[in-house]
Amino acid sequence: MDSLIAAAARALAAGDILGALKRVALRDDPPALALRGIAMAQLGDFVRAKALLRSAARAFSPREVVARARCVVAEAEIALVSRDLNWPAKALDAARATLEKHGDRVNAAHARHLEVRRLLLMGRLNEAARALSGLDPVFFPPASRAAYELLVAGVAIRRLQSKVARAALARAKNSARQAGIPALMAEVQSASLVLNTPAARLITRGEERLLLLEEVEGVLESGALVVDACRHVVRRANITVSLARRPVLFALTRAFGEAWPGDVSRDALVKRAFRAKQADESHRARLRVEIGRLRAKLRSLASLSATTRGFALTPHSAGEVVVLAPPVEGQHAAVIAFLADGESWSSSALALALGASARTVQRALDSLLAAGKVEPSGRGRARRWMTVPVLGFTTTLLLPGPLPSD
């Protein structure tokens, strides 16, 4: 490696993008192309960055497998940042294996970090935690340690472990300060804001208030019967009943939770569960069937008793019944939540992350565009969607809907 390439690499590692470009901007040898590609990616020109990295990967000789693998990792990071979740994960796995085989532990760890970040975006929490557990950050440089701790905090936040998340963010802050990279310090600062912004709403006895993550954790540990509208489950202590695949049953349960300790009329339940404007005898017959199913589902936690005008929920043990709801709800709230991270998403990436069909997501985006809540850029396959984050709230990635990994 010649002195200019080494100096450019050191400048990139320190966050000096322009300093790196000054050294390699007029060169077209493979290492210079790769460094220019990474620099352009950090400046936000992803199209040019991908072209440079692919040119570099082709220009490296077949014997330079480590250099080729590093180009693949850099391209994978560009795909992640641009929310191209369909980028082939197998290519990243192969590059990571090559880097590990040749002793490049730092770049191999970076490849693992990218894999974990992708899994977190897709809601595959358990897989992300398993991938992260295979890393030992002791010998990482400060920047890599900060990235590792940010991922630890991300997993902890989604598992509602506020103390673990806060400790990881403190370690990330120290490592970022040691690295001296302003962009990394800003990323840690942004992640820390999650713990100090509302993560959910608590609804009980007809009143509601916003909760921080620590308060959500306290509610779940309080012994109350919690109707969790963020994950579509009903829980108390160590008992959890999932209604994620039973939307009618969950709608009924939430109605009971919001009305507790009172009852809910049959007509109100029909309108809430079946979205009927006017309840008729067929709706009431169906309601009786669904109430029977719900009794069977909740028998370990509560009972449902008939009242003069409807039904009421009674927990088996003395205590409160509360509803935990996302901070922001409404039509297409899940799409808005993903877009609220400030990055640009393709409709195919949103469909993959949401577990929905591409057509369903496209209809939602068209509706949000008509309402002026999202903005597209580009055309055809290059089209991306963005929205302004909801000020004062975390995204529902913090308290996501039903996850396949839960």
Image: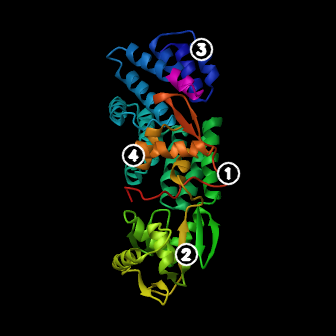
Q: Secondary structure at mark 4?
A: loop
Disc 3 target residue: 23
- Between 262 and 108, the one nearer to me in the picture: 262
Q: In the rendered structure, are the residues bearing label 2 and label 4 in contact, judged by CB atoms less than 8 Å apart?
A: no
* First of labels 3, 2 by sequence position: 3
The x and y percentages for residue 79 are 46, 32
The correct choice, above or below, for 313 with respect to 338 in the image is: below
Q: Which mark is residue 391?
A: 1
**Mark 4 belongs to which amino acid?**
Ser
What residue is disc 2 on? 258
Q: Tell me the kind of residue under disc 1.
A: Leu
Q: Earlier in the sequence, mark 2 or mark 4?
A: 2
Asked if the residue under mark 1 is in contact with the one under mark 4, i.e. CB atoms within 8 Å, the reply is no
Can residue 117 be seen in this snapshot? no
For marks 3 and 4, the one nearer the N-term is: 3
User: In 3D space, how far apart are the residues under numbered discs 3 and 2 (Cα atoms)?
Assistant: 63 Å
**How far is disc 4 from disc 1 in space, using C-alphas?**
29 Å
Q: What crowding class fits label 4: few (fewer than 14 Cα within 10 Å), some (14-19), or many (20 or more)?
A: few
The answer for how far apart the CA atoms under marks 3 and 4 are is 46 Å
Q: Is residue 282 left or right of residue 340?
A: left
Residue density around tag 2, few if under 14, some if 14–19, many if 20 or more, within 10 Å: many
User: What amino acid is at disc 2?
Assistant: Glu
Instruction: Name the main secondary structure of what is drawn in magenta.
Output: helix
